[in-house]
Image (spheres, rainbow, N blue to C red):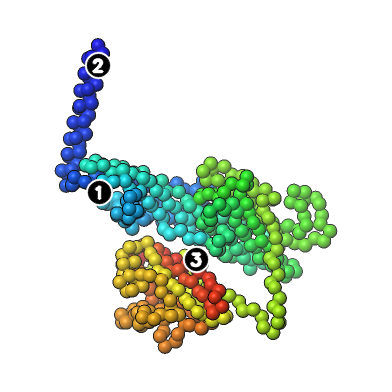
């Protein structure tokens, strides 16, 4: 009996091998595979954050949540070279299955470019896969949020006691900063520094009754000393409080009551979906330090550089292109104005590189690029970013106008393009910001 069973097992194994060989031969014939090639296919899915979005947010975040818009790269594990790159998962699906050399690969998908602070979320994911000769291998890539979500709201009591000119500054502590005014209340997204456990919120408000300005700095720490993770979501409500009042014992009346503000915060952790209240002891409150008085009152210290207008994503309809300008200010004078242009569109990057602008260039010291950076896009003499007859170097203010670029973006579809700007003044102080241009219609 055992001998018969063994014979059946051997026959089944032979049949399986024959079937596998037939399938392999069929694939090799259908796709004209060479001896060192195989097929690669993949599924890409997106894991949204545990906290639900409002209807308005869901509508505005369609592209960020739709994996069909995600850029996908296939990277050779051995050489770390990008073997294939697709501007979108939708484009990749049209080409599946992909014929690639046998080997081990990493599939990387991204919803855009990770910024330190943004009004749109950022998702990414990766998966490893081995492609064998003459066989079809399937990878599954799960994209997750790589940012912390901060939703800002104010209470009805806040609105009744404070003027509408309030400003909240939200930061990840390493340069990712977004300013939130009345018209901007909603969700923002911060990148996560290594080992970070907290975010910073600065509140500037004006008391209606007295006109008194109030500024308070809050450091909000994740409970249990856990590190921040992608998908963590802080829901922050700003409320009025009498300074000196104990939030845990509101019956205690301060001796010299003054109106102040406090934060009421819930934290939802994406991996578990659990929502917890952030205790008051984890919301450190402080006042901004008074600026140092200059040694010689007649010679106050000069302010550092300032970049205005590069904090938000600019949405562009190339049929009706907007004016897109960023103002540079440097009281000590501009020494360098470095610009780096990148894009989600490989075709646009190729065009920029052909123009000699594929690397970082200095508008204040253009050198051999002066003719290309000057001129006009309309007559093809240049791109019109500078006026060679009016040098930027040592100016105290300059308007970086990229409006002329907007019609150029139409052939590259609904993509995002980025202008990273670093302003350095004559004292060596520097500031860098990134302008994001998102084509939403063409």
User: Can residue 401 be seen in the rendering of this structure?
Assistant: no
Q: Secondary structure at mark 2?
A: helix
Point out the residue furthest to the front here.
78
**Does residue 2 appear to the left or right of 216 in the view shown?**
left
User: Can residue 217 be seen in the rendering of this structure?
Assistant: yes
Q: Nearer the viewer, mark 2 or mark 3?
A: 2
Give the vertical position of 288 relative to 111 (above or below): below
Give the labeled residue for mark 1. 101
How far across and how far down the image is residue 122, in percent? 46, 55
Mark 2 residue crowding within 10 angstroms, few (<14) / some (14–19) / many (20+):
few
Name which residue lies at 36% across and 72% down.
357
In terms of sequence position, does the residue under pointer 1 or pointer 2 come before the other?
A: 2
Give the labeled residue for mark 3. 312
Name which residue lies at 40% across and 80% down.
366
Name which residue lies at 17% across and 39% down.
25
Give the labeled residue for mark 2. 5
How far across and how far down the image is residue 342, in percent? 39, 66
In terms of sequence position, does the residue under pointer 2 or pointer 3 come before the other?
A: 2
Mark 1 residue crowding within 10 angstroms, few (<14) / some (14–19) / many (20+):
many
Q: Within the image, what quadrant is residue 134 found in?
A: top left
In terms of sequence position, does the residue under pointer 3 or pointer 1 come before the other?
A: 1
Give the vertical position of 45 relative to 260 (above or below): above
Give the vertical position of 15 relative to 227 (above or below): above
Point out the residue furthest to the top here.
1
**Does residue 419 appear to the left or right of 39 in the view shown?**
right
């Amino acid at each position: 009996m055992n001998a018969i069973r063994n014979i059946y097992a051997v026959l089944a194994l032979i049949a399986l091998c024959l079937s596998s060989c037939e399938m392999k031969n069929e694939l090799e014939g259908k796709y004209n595979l060479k001896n060192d090639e195989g097929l690669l296919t993949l599924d890409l899915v997106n894991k949204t954050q545990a906290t639900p979005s409002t209807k308005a947010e869901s509508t505005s975040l369609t592209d960020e949540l739709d994996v069909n818009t995600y850029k996908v790269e296939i990277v050779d594990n051995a050489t770390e070279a990008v073997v294939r790159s697709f501007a979108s998962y939708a484009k990749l699906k049209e080409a599946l299955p992909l014929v690639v050399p046998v080997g081990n690969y990493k599939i990387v998908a991204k919803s855009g470019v990770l910024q330190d602070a943004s009004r749109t979320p950022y998702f990414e994911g990766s998966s490893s896969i081995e492609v064998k000769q003459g066989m079809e291998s399937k990878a599954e890539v799960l994209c997750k949020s790589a940012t912390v979500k901060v939703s800002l709201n104010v209470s009805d009591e806040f609105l009744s006691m404070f003027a509408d000119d309030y400003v909240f500054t939200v930061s990840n502590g390493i340069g990712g900063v977004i300013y939130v005014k009345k018209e901007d209340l909603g969700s923002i997204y911060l990148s996560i520094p290594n080992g970070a456990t907290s975010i910073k919120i600065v509140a500037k408000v004006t008391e209606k009754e007295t006109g008194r300005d109030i500024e308070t700095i809050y450091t909000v720490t994740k409970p249990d000393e856990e590190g921040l993770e992608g998908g963590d979501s802080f829901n922050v409500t700003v409320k009025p409080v009498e300074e000196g009042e104990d939030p845990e014992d509101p019956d205690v009346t301060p001796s010299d009551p003054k109106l102040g503000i406090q934060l009421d915060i819930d934290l939802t952790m994406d991996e578990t979906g659990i929502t917890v209240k952030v205790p008051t002891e984890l919301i450190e409150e402080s006042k901004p330090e008074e600026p140092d008085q200059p040694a010689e009152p007649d010679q106050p210290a000069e302010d550092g550089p300032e970049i205005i207008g590069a904090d938000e994503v600019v949405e562009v309809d190339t049929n009706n292109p907007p004016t897109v300008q960023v103002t540079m200010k440097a009281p000590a004078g501009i020494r360098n104005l470095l610009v780096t242009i990148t894009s989600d569109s490989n075709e646009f990057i190729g065009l920029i590189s052909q123009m000699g602008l594929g690397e970082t260039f200095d508008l204040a010291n253009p050198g051999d690029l002066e003719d290309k950076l000057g001129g006009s896009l309309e007559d093809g003499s240049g791109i019109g970013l500078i006026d060679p007859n009016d040098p930027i170097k040592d100016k105290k203010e300059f308007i970086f106008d990229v409006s002329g670029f907007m019609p150029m973006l139409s052939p590259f579809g609904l993509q995002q393009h980025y202008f990273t700007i670093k302003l350095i003044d004559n004292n060596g102080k520097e500031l860098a910001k990134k302008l994001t241009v998102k084509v939403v219609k063409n």
